[in-house]
Image (cartoon, coloured by chain):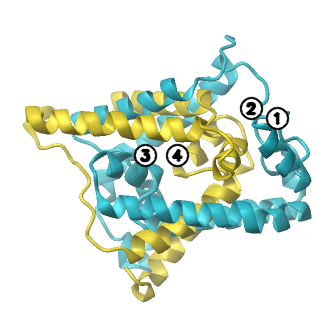
Amino acid sequence: MLSFDPWSWYITGPLISLVMATLLLIGRRFGISSNLRTMCSIAGAGKWSDYFRFDWKAQSWNLVFIAGTLAGGAIARFLLLKPGPVDLNPDTASALREMGVEDAGVAFAPEILFGSEAWSHPLSLLTLLLGGALVGFGTRWANGCTSGHAISGLSSLQWPSLIAVIGFFIGGLTVSHLILPIWLPLL
Amino acid sequence: MPFIFLLGLVFGITLTMGEVISWFRIQEMFHFDSFHMYGVIGAAIALGILFNVIAKRAGWKAAGGKEMDIYSYKAGWKRYLLGGAVFGMGWSITGACPGPLFIALGAGYLPILIAIAGALLGTLLYGLVMRHLPH
């Protein structure tokens, strides 16, 4: 059990580029959300839509990448990272506390959504289900997420990726400022 | 394959140590209250641009002498703007883009399983209705 402080942006950002560049150099590419399509195909979604009839085996390397990220999350949280809250900006923390997220500023993730408490709150589970559905639907519609558009696409100076990232922020800002202040107090 | 697993491992460790998987950090980003997330994404893009420029100038190839599989998105804007906005809404609600969905599960935040199930249902729904959506 080690106890490292969280990494700053200038460690975290460059390591993300390193992962992207290494994937390119071994003939792969950096894109997480395409795995959602692969997983649906494996589960038999090809019965309902041509979108899921593709050679998913050619994408199975990306599932191995995902498995690695799961292991990485476990190793980092349980063996490396010093337990403790996110050092949140007090303005964000107080805004979130006003919305009913009581542990803003004193936790790593809100208990009401990610703690064991969430299992006994149907509305928390509905929030996660709905939010997840928007992530899946939106990334497939936009043909990419933060890894494919924001990091890979902008790195190779693609206009569609810039439009997608603008879209990410239109959606995110709308929800964070207009929807969550009404929704979160209900949890 | 073990090497790809290792790369995923590095990515998972990085996003956890950098607190990118924290729902709070994503709210802070959408409130423009911290440089952290902009620094993370900005540094990743800046170095990514540098890599792509050098790779192009020097004519780097992928392993085995193949061309590197650089993304090339079809021109257009509707799917990117509209799909992007839908994803952005989900990013704010769950505090997770697709990578952190899985990393947070590994990190033991088990209720995120419901969000992963949601993401798969959302993907399925897209596959069913895509013909009727602007692209």
Q: Which of marks 1 and 4 is in front?
A: 1
Residue A24 x %, y %: 25, 39
- Report the chain shown in cyan: A
Q: Which mark is residue A136?
A: none
Q: Quadrant of the N terminus of chain A?
A: top right
Question: Who's the residue at 49% across and 75% down the image?
Answer: B126
Comes first in the chain, label 3 or label 2: 3
Q: Chain B is drawn in which colour?
A: yellow
In the image, B11 versus A170, the foreground residue is A170
Question: Which residue is disc 3 drawn over?
Answer: A63
Question: Who's the residue at 47% across and 81% down the image?
Answer: B128
Question: Which residue is disc 4 drawn over?
Answer: B99
At label 4, the amino acid type is: Gly
Q: Residue A86 carries which label?
A: 2
Does residue A128 appear to the left or right of A49 in the view shown?
Answer: right
Residue A156 x %, y %: 27, 48
Q: Is there CB contact under 8 Å for labels 3 and 1?
A: no
Question: Which residue is disc 1 drawn over?
Answer: A107
Q: Is there CB contact under 8 Å for labels 2 and 1?
A: yes
Asked if labels 1 and 4 share a chain, the reply is no
Q: Quadrant of residue B19?
A: top right
Q: Distance of mark 1 from mark 4, alpha carbons?
A: 21 Å
Q: Distance of mark 3 from mark 2, alpha carbons?
A: 29 Å
Disc 1, SS: loop
Disc 4, SS: helix
